Amino acid sequence: MIENLTVHLKGISKRFGKKQALEKVDFELKKGEIHAIVGENGAGKTTLVNCLFGMIQPDEGEITINGIRYDKLSPRLAVEAGVGMVHQHFKLIPEFTVAENVFLGQEIIKNGIVQEKLQNRRIEELSKRYGLEVDPLTPIYGMSVGMRQRVEILRALSKDIRVLVLDEPTAVLTPNEVDQLFEVLRKLVADGLSIIFISHHLHEIMRIADRITVLRSGKKHVTELTTGLSELEIARLIIGRDQSQVLKHSEADPGDVVLRVEDVLITDSRGAQTVKGVSFNVREGEVVGLAGVAGNGQSELAEAIIGMRKVDAGRICYLGQDITNISVSQLREKEIGVIPEDRLQRGVNPYMTIAQNIYTGSMNDESYGRIFLKLDKIEQHAMDLVKEYDIRGVDDGTFVGELSGGNIQKVVLARELSSQPKLVIASEPSRGLDIGATEFVHKQLLELRNNRSAVFLLSTELEEVLSLSDRILIIHGGRIMSEFDRHSIPDEAVLSAFMLGVENKS
């Protein structure tokens, strides 16, 4: 019966071309437990749960749900079996509203007519119930990444499921939103649901998971109870060594202003003002971090700086040159590195190879040829960066879309940072990265800063901003509410400014 539903994966193997993504992996989910799957980028975590949800067909192995063995699953059959999934990369239709996305394929219909008012009411009820409030009439294209994640979670919870798979669900949530989500998960478990939880945040795993399964290079390494384990011990299980705890953050020596933002106003597609008179500057040789709860204007601000969103008033200057409302193609001609918030939609072309994606950052470099491209040189440059940035799961002709989320992010980082740009706009640079890769990225950003680059860091991870930044700006309601330098950060003041928008300038 569905009340006794469990999941048992036995001997699951999957190969993509020459890459062995999974090799005879066993996994069991018990009723009423939260079971975390952890591992480095490319370890096979997402591939394994995609096999369970029918997104991928394993080459061999058995899948049993609630005592019933399935030789072949599809997403629809998985849902019918009681399995729901929140994907790492969004599966939303931008032009549709929240309600249309949530009820897509399961519309409430009466006499051949979709009952939109009833659907909207259901969304409002779900939103309030789970503490993830969104407007059911808002189109997805006008929402921040954080708000889109809320819609994904609501869509999964709206179905009659007994197993919930969460692939990096907290990557775009604030600490308060994570707390709210965990409250929801505990209620679901108390009602008999079982949850598979994938996260690179070890403190989250310690808080929420009953057991963990560690994958290494597509193989199951160990399954353990979290009780009695420390974050350090989990890190050792994942990467086979101790995680570095301290970044070498030398004293900043800021030089000339590289990026200047003056009284910038931005209006979104609904006519709402999302950025309200923001002013700041970033100098060479420093990291300026912008921290804030998702949906407070930081996404729109970053898009405006890189030419993807129109500025209604104010100026954006780069090295003294007015680049307000510059086009993306014009921006690419300058020495500016861009790490976009949504790597899959705006960072890469998933249908191009790694070499082709990396070359798009060097198209103005004539050493690669003009009319006739030097393909061997382009490929060799890409493979050198693959090694340097530890991009895993790569062979000749690998398309970027075949990589794990973290390895896709590494492709973006390799392309944008390896040229030593004068300015880096880094939005959520460690999102989806494992602990070792996050450490590597942070070191890269500090090395750029030490080599006189200017780094503008935007992150919803307060810890990331605090550890990397020389100056810290707090954004709330589209305004810069607080500013601190790294030597005068009162923790409580930062947290209150971060969460509540309390103004406190030092």
Image (cartoon, rainbow, N blue to C red):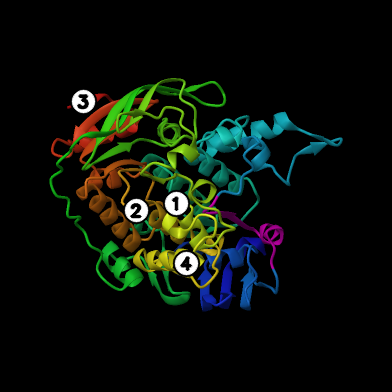
- Return the mark for residue 505: 3
Return the residue nearer the eye: 2 or 373: 373
The type of residue carrying mark 1 is: Gly
Instruction: Tell me if residue 8 is in the magenta stretch.
Output: no
What residue sits right under mark 4 in the picture?
A: 379
Q: Amino acid at mark 2?
A: Ser
Q: CA distance from mark 4 to mark 3?
A: 49 Å
Residue at disc 1, secondary structure: loop
Which of disc 3 and disc 4 is earlier in sequence? 4
Q: Classify residue 259 by image quadrant.
A: top left
Distance of mark 3 from mark 2, alpha carbons? Answer: 35 Å
Which residue matches tag 2?
419
**Label 1: how many Cα within 10 Å (few below 14, some 14–19, many 20+):** many
Q: Quadrant of the C terminus?
A: top left
Is there a contact, CB below 8 Å, between mark 2 and mark 1? yes
Q: Is residue 228 visible?
A: no
Q: Residue at x 65, y 51 (%)?
A: 160
What amino acid is at disc 3?
A: Lys
Residues drawn in magenta:
73-89
| Chain-order first, disc 1 or disc 4 | 1
Question: In the rendered structure, are the residues bearing label 4 and label 3 in contact, judged by CB atoms less than 8 Å apart?
Answer: no
